[in-house]
Image: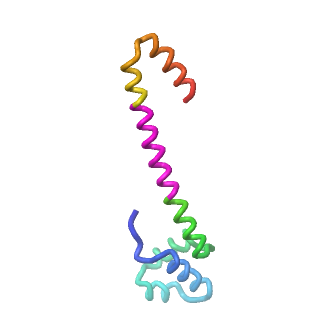
Protein backbone atom coordinates (compact mmCIF):
# COMPACT_ATOMS: atom_id res chain seq x y z
CA UNK A 1 0.00 0.00 0.00
CA UNK A 2 1.25 3.47 -0.87
CA UNK A 3 2.45 5.58 2.06
CA UNK A 4 0.56 8.83 2.51
CA UNK A 5 2.28 12.18 2.91
CA UNK A 6 -0.17 12.95 5.69
CA UNK A 7 -0.73 11.27 9.02
CA UNK A 8 -4.19 10.15 10.05
CA UNK A 9 -4.20 12.94 12.63
CA UNK A 10 -3.60 15.58 9.93
CA UNK A 11 -6.36 14.10 7.78
CA UNK A 12 -8.86 14.08 10.65
CA UNK A 13 -7.86 17.65 11.52
CA UNK A 14 -8.58 18.75 7.93
CA UNK A 15 -11.98 17.03 7.97
CA UNK A 16 -12.83 18.66 11.30
CA UNK A 17 -11.87 22.05 9.82
CA UNK A 18 -14.29 21.44 6.94
CA UNK A 19 -17.03 20.45 9.37
CA UNK A 20 -16.35 23.68 11.29
CA UNK A 21 -17.07 25.71 8.17
CA UNK A 22 -13.88 26.07 6.11
CA UNK A 23 -14.22 25.60 2.37
CA UNK A 24 -12.88 22.45 0.75
CA UNK A 25 -10.93 24.43 -1.85
CA UNK A 26 -9.18 26.38 0.89
CA UNK A 27 -8.17 23.24 2.80
CA UNK A 28 -7.03 21.50 -0.40
CA UNK A 29 -4.92 24.49 -1.46
CA UNK A 30 -3.28 24.60 1.96
CA UNK A 31 -2.56 20.84 2.03
CA UNK A 32 -1.74 20.68 -1.70
CA UNK A 33 -4.21 17.89 -2.48
CA UNK A 34 -7.10 17.64 -4.91
CA UNK A 35 -10.73 17.93 -3.80
CA UNK A 36 -11.19 14.30 -4.91
CA UNK A 37 -8.51 13.23 -2.43
CA UNK A 38 -10.14 15.26 0.32
CA UNK A 39 -13.56 13.71 -0.32
CA UNK A 40 -11.99 10.25 -0.38
CA UNK A 41 -10.48 11.00 3.05
CA UNK A 42 -13.83 12.30 4.24
CA UNK A 43 -15.57 9.13 3.08
CA UNK A 44 -13.01 6.95 4.84
CA UNK A 45 -12.31 8.91 8.03
CA UNK A 46 -15.40 11.13 8.40
CA UNK A 47 -16.92 11.07 11.87
CA UNK A 48 -13.82 9.54 13.46
CA UNK A 49 -11.49 10.95 16.05
CA UNK A 50 -7.72 10.64 15.65
CA UNK A 51 -7.54 7.88 18.27
CA UNK A 52 -10.19 5.86 16.43
CA UNK A 53 -8.26 6.20 13.16
CA UNK A 54 -5.09 4.96 14.85
CA UNK A 55 -7.02 2.01 16.29
CA UNK A 56 -8.43 1.23 12.83
CA UNK A 57 -4.94 1.28 11.34
CA UNK A 58 -3.64 -1.06 14.07
CA UNK A 59 -6.50 -3.48 13.48
CA UNK A 60 -5.88 -3.48 9.73
CA UNK A 61 -2.19 -4.24 10.29
CA UNK A 62 -3.02 -7.04 12.73
CA UNK A 63 -5.55 -8.50 10.30
CA UNK A 64 -2.96 -8.46 7.52
CA UNK A 65 -0.40 -10.17 9.78
CA UNK A 66 -2.91 -12.86 10.79
CA UNK A 67 -3.85 -13.53 7.16
CA UNK A 68 -0.18 -14.05 6.27
CA UNK A 69 0.24 -16.33 9.28
CA UNK A 70 -2.79 -18.38 8.25
CA UNK A 71 -1.49 -18.71 4.68
CA UNK A 72 1.91 -19.88 5.95
CA UNK A 73 0.35 -22.44 8.29
CA UNK A 74 -1.95 -23.70 5.53
CA UNK A 75 1.04 -24.21 3.26
CA UNK A 76 2.95 -26.06 5.99
CA UNK A 77 -0.07 -28.28 6.59
CA UNK A 78 -0.36 -29.13 2.90
CA UNK A 79 3.34 -29.92 2.65
CA UNK A 80 3.25 -32.16 5.71
CA UNK A 81 0.21 -34.00 4.29
CA UNK A 82 2.09 -34.55 1.03
CA UNK A 83 5.11 -35.95 2.91
CA UNK A 84 2.90 -38.32 4.91
CA UNK A 85 1.06 -39.38 1.80
CA UNK A 86 4.34 -40.44 0.16
CA UNK A 87 5.61 -42.22 3.29
CA UNK A 88 2.48 -44.31 4.04
CA UNK A 89 1.41 -47.58 2.46
CA UNK A 90 -1.74 -47.49 0.30
CA UNK A 91 -3.88 -48.99 3.11
CA UNK A 92 -2.58 -46.47 5.65
CA UNK A 93 -3.15 -43.64 3.19
CA UNK A 94 -6.81 -44.56 2.72
CA UNK A 95 -7.42 -44.65 6.46
CA UNK A 96 -5.41 -41.51 7.29
CA UNK A 97 -6.63 -39.21 4.53
CA UNK A 98 -10.27 -40.18 4.75
CA UNK A 99 -10.27 -38.92 8.33
CA UNK A 100 -8.56 -35.67 7.24
CA UNK A 101 -11.03 -35.05 4.45
CA UNK A 102 -13.88 -35.32 6.94
CA UNK A 103 -12.32 -32.57 9.06
CA UNK A 104 -12.12 -30.01 6.23
Q: Nearer the viewer, residue 4 or 71?
A: 71
Residue at image location 51% in from the left, 15% down from the top: 95
Counting from the top left corner in percent of width and height, residue 104 is at 55, 30
Tell me the quarter of the picture where residue 43 sits.
bottom right
Q: How is the image coloured?
A: rainbow
Residue at image location 40% in from the left, 12% down from the top: 89
Tell me the quarter of the picture where residue 3 sits.
bottom left
Residue at image location 44% in from the left, 84% down from the top: 31
Query: In the image, is 1 to the left or to the right of 16?
Result: left
The region drawn magenta spans 62-79
Counting from the top left corner in percent of width and height, residue 6 is at 44, 77
Counting from the top left corner in percent of width and height, residue 69 is at 46, 47
56 lies above or below 65: below
87 lies above or below 43: above
Q: Which quadrant holds the N terminus? A: bottom left
Q: Name the chief secondary structure element in magenta.
A: helix
Counting from the top left corner in percent of width and height, residue 35 is at 47, 79
Residue at image location 41% in from the left, 36% down from the top: 76
Query: In the image, is 62 to the left or to the right of 34?
Result: right
Question: Magenta span has 1?
Answer: no
44 lies above or below 101: below
Q: Nearer the viewer, residue 90 or 19?
A: 90
Question: Magenta span has 69?
Answer: yes
Disc tally is: 0
Amino acid sequence: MKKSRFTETQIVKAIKAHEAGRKVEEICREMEVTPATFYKWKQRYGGMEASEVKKLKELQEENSRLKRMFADLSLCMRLSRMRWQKALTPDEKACWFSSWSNME
